[in-house]
Image: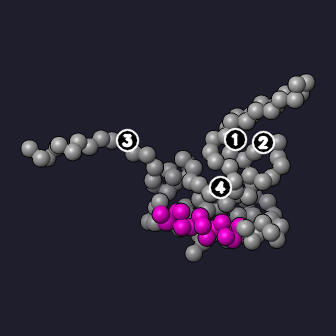
């Protein structure tokens, strides 16, 4: 069960063609499984927003914009034809970003536990 619709993905992104709409539908179902595995009890609105962000990232990674989706830094040169990008995450693949994990209430927790505590 998807948490967002194709129209909701398009609303904050761009209009999708027929092939992209088919892919979007499948990706929304897959994103829902990933979200449930990470945070089944998260709110419906958060799940919708996270689903849209995940799917836009995948579909947008095939766009031919100047900078790829997911990049955190970029360099363009002219004379020597140089182009460098630093990618903050995986492109072309569904994943939960650090921000999305925070939205869902999951992620890295700092702490420690000693296996010897309480045994004495």
Q: Please state the horizontal and vertical placement of residue 117, each as a whole percent of the image.
A: 17, 43
Q: Quadrant of residue 77?
A: top right
Answer with mark 4 or mark 2, whichever residue precedes in sequence.
Answer: 2
Answer with mark 1 or mark 3, whichever residue precedes in sequence.
Answer: 1
**Residue 43 visible (yes or no):** no
Q: Please state the horizontal and vertical placement of residue 59, each as a whole percent of the image.
A: 73, 58
Residue at the spot 47% in from the left edge and 63% down from the top edge = 37
User: In this figure, which residue is indicated by the disc labeled 1?
Assistant: 71
Q: CA distance from mark 4 to mark 3?
A: 27 Å
Q: CA distance from mark 2 to mark 3?
A: 34 Å
Q: CA distance from mark 1 to mark 2?
A: 7 Å
Answer with mark 2 or mark 3, whichever residue precedes in sequence.
Answer: 2
Q: Please state the horizontal and vertical placement of residue 11, each as a whole percent of the image.
A: 74, 63
Residue bounds of the magenta highlight: 24-37
User: In this figure, which residue is indicated by the disc labeled 3?
Assistant: 110
Of residues 55 and 115, which is closer to you in this image?
A: 115
């Amino acid at each position: 069960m998807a948490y967002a619709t194709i129209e909701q993905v398009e609303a904050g992104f761009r209009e999708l063609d027929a092939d992209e709409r088919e892919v979007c539908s499948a990706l929304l179902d897959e994103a829902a499984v990933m979200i449930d595995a990470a945070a089944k009890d998260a709110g419906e609105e958060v799940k919708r927003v996270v689903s849209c962000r995940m799917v836009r990232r995948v579909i947008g990674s095939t766009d031919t914009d100047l900078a790829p989706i997911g990049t955190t830094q970029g360099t363009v040169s002219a004379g020597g034809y140089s182009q460098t990008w630093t990618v903050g995450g995986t492109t072309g693949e569904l994943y939960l970003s650090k921000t999305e994990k925070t939205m869902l209430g999951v992620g890295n927790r700092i702490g420690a536990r000693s296996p010897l505590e309480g045994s004495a």
